[in-house]
Amino acid sequence: MPVPREFLRTSYTYHLPPHLIATHPISPKEEAKLMVYERTSDKLTHTTFKEIFNFFPPNALVVLNDTKVIKARLYGYKEQGKPVEILIHQPQGLLDCMVQMRGRVRAGLVLDLRHGYCVQVQKVLENGMRLVRFIKEREGFLEWAGVLEMLELLGHVPLPPYLKRSDEVQDLQDYQSVFAKYPGAIAAPTASLHFSQSAKNHLLKNFRHVFITLHVGAGTFLSVQSEDIRQHPMHAEFVQVSPQAGEALDNAPYILCVGTTALRATEHYKRGFGLEPCNLFLHPGNPVRHAQALLTNFHLPESTLIMLVASMVGLDKCLELYKIAIEHHYRFYSYGDGMLIL
């Protein structure tokens, strides 16, 4: 049987002029463009983030992700001085870390990280993944808290690969949400990046809200490879919903999620998955069930994120909205403009 159109990976392709990829955020943040789509009336509004709270329903429970981006990219050096790029993914047990390394790296290899630190490859896995241990001179193997301390000294902001540039000092601020609290993400929950400190204060003062924690992983940038999207193995990410947040979610008449990670965490909790890592893949065959609204950016073609948007509005409407965004010169991806789906 042929694969239905909404499950074909290639259905989620669109052409984006390169100049619409935002390499830096708009300043001030309130000047970023905002597309508001109201599903029940099929109404579309073009505005800016300065007006966003005028569109928040007064009875909405706003769900925010308080993960904090860590400086997850660093460089190790072989004896001959050639750098090896390392992207930290997550801790594995007490001492091991899952990382991604570029180039040929064998088990047992030790790379110098400078400043008294080095990394030892424990195991070579598939897809460029390695199991490693970090070592500090005169102290030995580092636990996760020590790794985070090391990253503050040696690490770089893990900007998305499609930005095609090195991190800058300003990215330390720009690529971190004002809601960030718990370190562990290697990518920013980008819808949150639109909020300035004053917008955050206004939101927390005037709307019911809860914080959840979902540490965004590198898988968020991966394109779906399988022809049938239902066969895509979704990456798993750490998620935590406190009892207080869970109670609020259970009793909320209207849930508005700031970002796809907040939405996936909400659906993960409401579907009863508890403390399991979140590998929930939302698409037209597995649509959003429990949230009524989503604030999100414009996402890469053939990514799980554009498929999530299609799960809320349908494939055809999703592609139509993206076409309109391109025609109106919206800026795309992590540092780009946003869309509010009501």
Image (spheres, grey):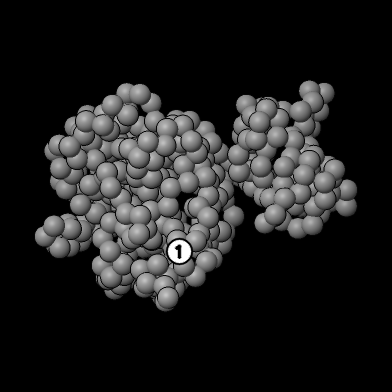
Taking 54 as reference, is 142 above or below it?
Answer: above
Kindly identify the residue that appears in the image at 50 percent across and 52 percent down.
Answer: 234
Image quadrant in which the N terminus is located? bottom left
Taking 295 as reference, is 298 above or below it?
Answer: below
Judged from this view, the residue extending furthest toward the right is 79
Kindly identify the residue that appears in the image at 37 percent across and 72 percent down.
Answer: 4
The part of the image, by quadrant, that contains residue 33 is bottom left
Judged from this view, the residue extending furthest toward the left is 41
Name the residue type under label 1.
Ile
Residue 324 in the image, given as x and y percentages of width and height: 27, 70
Q: Can residue 207 be seen in the rendering of this structure? A: yes
Taking 178 as reference, is 85 above or below it?
Answer: below
Front residue (pair 224, 50): 224
Tag 1, which secondary structure? helix
The part of the image, by quadrant, that contains residue 247 is top left
Kindly identify the residue that appears in the image at 27 percent across and 33 percent down.
Answer: 249
From the viewer's perspective, tell me whether residue 63 is left or right of residue 165: left
The part of the image, by quadrant, that contains residue 313 is bottom left
From the viewer's perspective, tell me whether residue 213 is left or right of residue 56: right
Q: Can residue 335 be seen in the rendering of this structure? A: no
Taking 124 as reference, is 120 above or below it?
Answer: above
Kindly identify the residue that appears in the image at 37 percent across and 49 percent down.
Answer: 260
Tally of numbered discs:
1
Front residue (pair 291, 330): 291
**Circle 1: is it few (<14), some (14-19), or many (20+) Cα within 10 Å?**
many
Residue indicated by mark 1? 229
From the viewer's perspective, tell me whether residue 7 is left or right of residue 134: left
Residue 165 in the image, given as x and y percentages of width and height: 57, 59
Residue 266 in the image, given as x and y percentages of width and height: 34, 40
Residue 215 in the image, given as x and y percentages of width and height: 49, 39
